[in-house]
């Protein structure tokens, strides 16, 4: 696993463009209900919003875009809705991967992929392999994912390393555990966006959100577009990121840099 430092640099103390943006895409079903449409149409419209935000992320120089597509709790939804979601997911892979690859965008998947059908798992693996060398933007799609699950997975790996005699219990620090996470090689989340008017993080990337700036939008996900992302980035640019320091200390550090 790559040894990537997660300590913030001075430039990250005063937000400009976030390196890593994560989005909880909420509101597809409500969008469809408002239009007297079946829920699947909300998810189809949401897929179009994904494409718009990917294009806007490239334009704004964002390095990593992580999208919460399907949580581990979403299996509790009605079976027909889950089936429609899986079918849409496979269609999107088949339809969009070549286009993303042509635009030098890398695709990665985060979560327990073993829960999906073989055809869908194969499609995800092929998409990751095809786009592995691309570096214009990394799009991470979180599926069958939960933040508590990810931390538990990291803890299990650490416990196994102790049993194997590879490390001592005292070696299990926050830095060590961060390297056991699935996204250990990407920067932590700078900005979390949630659409749909809800103000919670819903078990999403609990470790990586430790010092993230949070932005909540009343827009339903299918209505979220480039201008919506620009508003979120503008709000982020006005935040002073302290990482435990006082505001005065941050100002002094920025002045010393200048």
Image (tube, rainbow, N blue to C red):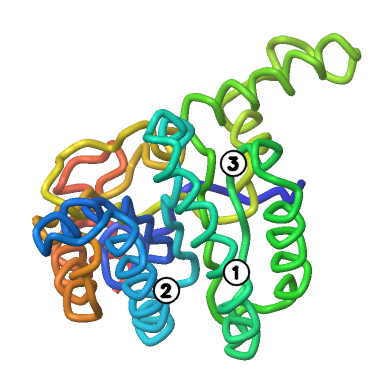
Residue in the image at 15% along x and 42% along y: 198
Cβ atoms under marks 2 and 1 closer than 8 Å: no
2 vs 3, front mark: 3
Counting other residues with Cα less than 10 Å from the Cα at mark 2, is it few (<14), some (14-19), or many (20 or more)? some
Report x, y in % for residue 126: 76, 66
Residue at point 68%, 59% (across, down): 124
| Numbered disc 3: secondary structure | loop
Q: CA distance from mark 2 to mark 3?
A: 22 Å
Could you tell whether 165 is left or right of 47 in the image? right
Circle 1 residue: 93
Q: Position of residue 173 (x, y in %)?
A: 60, 23
Q: Is residue 92 depicted above or below 10 in this figure?
A: below
Q: Quadrant of residue 48?
A: bottom left
Give the number of the mark in front: 2 or 1.
1
Instruction: Tell me which numbered mark, 1 or 3, is placed earlier along the sequence.
Output: 1
Of 82 and 46, which appears nearest the observer?
82
As drawn, is 196 to the left or to the right of 82?
left
Q: Are marks 2 and 3 in contact (CB under 8 Å)?
A: no
Q: Which mark is residue 62?
A: 2
Residue, disc 3: 111
Secondary structure at numbered mark 1: helix
All told, the count of numbered labels is 3
Single out the residue that lies furthest toward the bottom: 102
For label 1, the crowd category at 10 Å Cα-Cα, with few meaning under 14, some 14 to 19 and many 20 or more, is some
């Amino acid at each position: 696993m790559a040894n990537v430092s997660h300590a913030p640099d001075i430039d990250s103390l005063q937000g400009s463009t976030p390196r890593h943006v994560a989005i909880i895409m909420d509101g597809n079903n409500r969008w469809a209900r408002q239009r007297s449409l079946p829920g699947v149409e909300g998810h189809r419209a949401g897929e179009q919003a994904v494409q718009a935000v990917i294009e806007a992320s490239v334009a704004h120089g964002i390095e990593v875009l992580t999208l919460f597509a399907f949580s581990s709790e979403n299996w509790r939804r009605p079976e027909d809705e889950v089936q429609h979601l899986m079918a849409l997911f496979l269609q999107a892979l088949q339809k969009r991967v070549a286009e993303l690859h042509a635009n030098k965008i890398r695709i990665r998947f985060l979560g327990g992929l073993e829960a999906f059908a073989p055809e869908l798992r194969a499609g995800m693996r092929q998409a990751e392999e095809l786009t592995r060398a691309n570096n214009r933007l990394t799009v991470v799609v979180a599926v069958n994912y939960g933040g508590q699950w990810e931390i538990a997975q990291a803890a299990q790996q650490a416990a196994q390393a102790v049993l194997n005699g590879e490390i001592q219990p005292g070696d299990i620090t926050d830095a060590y555990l961060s390297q056991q996470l699935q996204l250990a090689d990407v920067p932590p989340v700078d900005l979390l966006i949630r659409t749909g008017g809800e103000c919670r993080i819903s078990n999403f990337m609990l470790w990586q959100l430790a010092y993230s700036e949070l932005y909540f939008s009343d827009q339903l996900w299918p209505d979220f577009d480039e201008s919506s992302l620009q508003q979120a980035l503008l709000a982020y640019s006005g935040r002073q990121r302290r990482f435990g320091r006082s505001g005065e200390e941050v100002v002094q550090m920025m002045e010393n840099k200048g």
